[in-house]
Image (cartoon, rainbow, N blue to C red):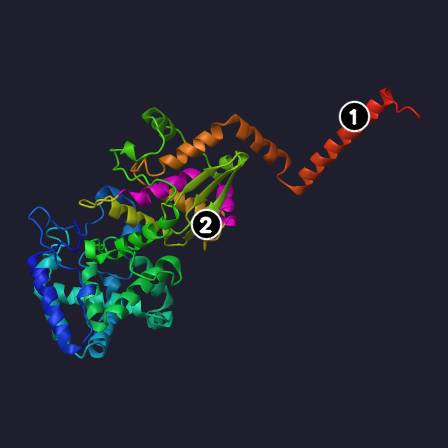
Amino acid sequence: MSMADNSVSEQEFRSVANEEREEASPPEVSILIPSAKTTTESQVRRRRIYKVPPPLRANMEHVYDPVVLSLGPYHHGRPQFRQVEEFKAEILNRFVSGSVAKDKSFFFNKILEQIDEIRSYYEEGSTNEFNDEALAEMVLSDACFILHYMELEDENEYHPLGMSLVSFMFRDFLMLENQIPLWIIRYLIGLKYDKDEGEALFYKFLSFMNFGDDRLTQIPWDNDNGSEPLHLLEAHRTTLLGQGKEFIRDQPRFLPRLLGFRWKRWKRKISSQSMFKMESRPFYSVTDLKAKGIHFRPSSNCLTDVRFHSYPFYGLLQLPIWFVTNNSMVFFSNMMAFEMSPEIDTDCDVISYVNFMKSLLETPRDVKELREKGILFSCLGSDEEVLKMYKQIDTYGVNNCGLFLDVKTRIEEHCSSKAKTWMADLIHTYFRSPWTAIALFAATLLLCLTFLQTYYTIHPVKNN
């Protein structure tokens, strides 16, 4: 269920917001607020921001619980968040005094009008301890804090909190249980900026957070068809899965459900027997593939952009670029928890990417190879730590077996070819370094000279 398919009360909320915006200044707000659509009763069931299921949380609280920053009702009010909560109040005052010349009550009342709508985004009963006013105050403060973070051009703004809090704050933004509905954030953006400025702020923020640059030139989803993400975590996921798909048009993208395979999407026939044969044994590691004559090259930043090309004398496997940080495990774990949440219809893209990388990385040598090829970048201390990070991510047996099945099948065919394997072994053995190549050339030349000497000894050249 998309954010655009909201109830009539939210439609009224948007229309009132647009009227207020028109009175304050000419620019429009409507593009930054999810558009209302006429829906049937079966379509209005909305997606919720669910908590991480208890089986996933077991002994993993450090991955799913925020440390210094609370957003939304699930972790609000804990003592460790007091310092940041005080800073939130300061940020809210800045927003009220410097945005559209409205007092705090204006924004508070706008949120309060939709408080029942906001409650419906969280698990039933999880907001009962907050009355309407307290929940509205919380959501407004959190949304303003996120907007302030999106506007930052200089991280020195956070120095009053101390660098230790700042580093953990970036991590807490990635928590599944630390989210508020995205449309609230975009509503405040619409009140403060005109349409073009607001969109530019948003896609530049997503670009910097995910790629470290300003490559995005538009929001990576279509607001008109109701595909706006539920929250910022899903917005990051949409951004990472949307980049690079234009480069894989030559390869059919297989998008099955976990257990239902759409075989008609394939250009080649793949038997279910061969599929389960591949899935029932460990896949090749990077070192194994390299020994089979397969080279590695970066593809794009899209996590599902995995391509393989087989040539007569070698193969080429292209993998997504990823920058490994101290927060990577938190990011992947919470993203996978989102993909496994109720009422979330995904193809488990992130889970499948993690499973595929775990199958490729068996030793630090595998990490080293991908790092040298510009596929993996790391700010960790060693290749061993990168390997440990991937291995510690638990996917709980969930996988979209078909997402990379075409790539795995092509790799299997390449590695099963005796001619290509023999040629790869020859190159790997005798041409892996200039010295072995020179030694092979010298031995071959010596053998030819010996043959010629023997021939002319037996058949001497006659004098004319």
Q: CA distance from mark 2 to mark 1?
A: 50 Å
**Helix, strand, or loop for circle 2?**
strand
Q: Quadrant of the C terminus?
A: top right
Please tell me whether residue 367 belongs to the stretch shown in magenta.
yes
Give the residues drawn in magenta, as a range.
347-373
Residue indicated by mark 1: 451
The amino acid pointed to by label 1 is Phe
Residue 113's mark? none
**Helix, strand, or loop for circle 1?**
helix
Residue 423: image quadrant is: top right
Pick the residue in front: 214 or 284. 214
Residue at 20% x, 57% y: name it. Answer: 224
In the image, residue 369 sits, relative to residue 82, either above or below, namely above
Horizontal arrangement in the rendering, residue 165 relative to residue 429 (left or right): left
The amino acid pointed to by label 2 is Leu
**Chain-order first, disc 2 or disc 1:** 2
Residue 57 placed where, x, y %? Answer: 26, 45
Residue 96 placed where, x, y %? Answer: 19, 76
Residue 162 placed where, x, y %? Answer: 35, 69
Please tell me whether residue 182 belongs to the stretch shown in magenta.
no
The answer to whether residue 283 of the structure is visible from this angle is no
Pick the residue in front: 239 or 326. 239
Residue indicated by mark 2: 376
Residue 427 placed where, x, y %? Answer: 60, 35
